[in-house]
Amino acid sequence: MKDSRLSWSDLKALWRPGGAGFLFIVFAIFLNSTDMFSIVLGGGSVASALDLFVLLPLLYWLARNFGFLIRGVMAVPELSALLALACVSILWSVEPGATAWRLLPLVVTTAAAMAFGSRVSLRTLIIGLGLLAAFITIVCYLAVATLPSARGIAPWTNTWRGVFNHKNGLGASCMLMLISATSAAILCQGRARGFFAAVACGAAFLLFQSESRTSQAISMISMTALTVGMLSRGRALLWGVSYILFVACLVGLLTFLFASSSADPIFSLIGREPTLSGRLPLWAITWPNVIDRLWLGYGYAAFWDPDRHAVIAIARDYTIGYVPYYSHSGLIETLLNTGLVGLTLLVILLVRAVATVFSGFRRGMALPELVAALVILIAFVLLNLTESTVLSRQSMIWMVFVAVVTKLGNIARAQARIGAQPAVQRYRWAKASGLEPGLRGKQ
């Protein structure tokens, strides 16, 4: 059988006219994935204006690929409903002006990611994420080499932040870049494999320099799972079930340790407080506000206005001592933005995406793309335990998640149309699902 892995000549084809559209959308996502202008210009109104200006390439691409956006909307109705809920939350928002202003970049970047996920095959999507990782990695090193602020700001003067506003932003992005670049390297051969392997090594060093412990821990789990998954393709279903059970048990164990005093001796030994860098008291004092408006929340990106009485009360609490601008929790932030209704939509979206991956495993399609997709989904969930990237505007993490779940939604629709197929017809299912070999494959 002909090796379906991509070569350097396949990647070079992207620079020809036929591949220009693919490179354009990857580069446009790159422009909207970092805080580059804020880092270079030191913030201010000019940087804010440029952050909005870079939405124009995405709008242009959306206009040319509007049909794929419609396909994405139909493929992931839960995501479409979640985005619509965020938009209509302006009706009950406690800060309607802030909600309206922040919805614009959210809608544009989410819609572009949905269209991108519908436009290309899963294989092409993983390659695109690898190229996105290459763009961001190169720019981060350039920033570190030329801008002192990219190498750290007080109180984290010895940690890198690259072209992100915070070291944790660099760490989370590097975690996802490491997974994407490694997956792309597995899908390639020859010089193309070497290129993506170099990108993965570069992202790994940036992750180390960020000193983002949460992202480093998630990276270790994700890369171990990715390696085992690629080596266990003959038993992909068993690997997938074991991976999810392991993550569930790990989260349960950590929750028990932090909710009790069992781990206090360990933290005393290493000289740290068992508060997850102040997250636990922040969650505890924020939770009553969540309960007050449980069903629909406070409106998208409206709760953390520093002049609101609730935020001032949180900041004045002796366990906090600063004015927070978000909750460091995807669960709490989703409830504050869209309430229990929005959280339910998100959970259904995740469950259906994971079920699509397992459906492919059951059909014998233990392709590296599906393994990579599951690792990305689980990494997204783990990251949102102590950070918040759900419905995050102009965020690499959110756009990558949206593109992957949209692609899986299209695959699920293809599965439903074709139905059960015997083993000899698996390739037909893979082709219709957008899993076919080749860089240009479409769903």
Image (spheres, grey):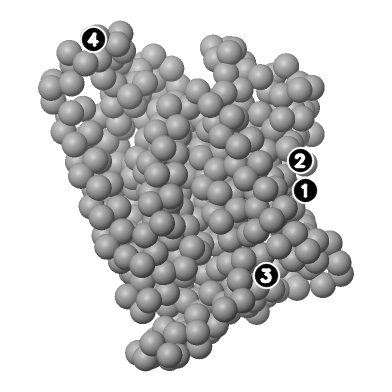
Which residue is at the front of the view, 212 or 242?
242
Mark 3 is on which residue type?
Answer: Leu
Q: In terms of secondary structure, where does tag 2 sit?
A: helix
Q: Earlier in the sequence, mark 2 or mark 4?
A: 2
Report the Cα–Cα distance between label 1 and label 4. 49 Å
Residue corresponding to mark 4: 268
The answer to whether one can see residue 318 in this image is no
Residue corresponding to mark 2: 49
Report the Cα–Cα distance between label 2 and label 1. 6 Å
Residue 156 percent coordinates (x, y): 55, 15
The answer to whether one can see residue 280 in this image is yes
Q: Is residue 119 left or right of residue 74?
A: right
Mark 1 is on which residue type?
Answer: Phe
Is 13 above or below relative to 428?
Answer: above
Q: Quadrant of the C terminus?
A: bottom right
At a point 37% along the width and 60% down the height, the residue shown is 232
Q: Are marks 4 and 3 in contact (CB under 8 Å)?
A: no
Which residue is at the front of the view, 273 or 63?
273
Residue 170 percent coordinates (x, y): 57, 33
Q: Earlier in the sequence, mark 4 or mark 3?
A: 4
Report the Cα–Cα distance between label 2 and label 4. 47 Å
Residue 276 percent coordinates (x, y): 33, 24
Residue 439 image label: 3
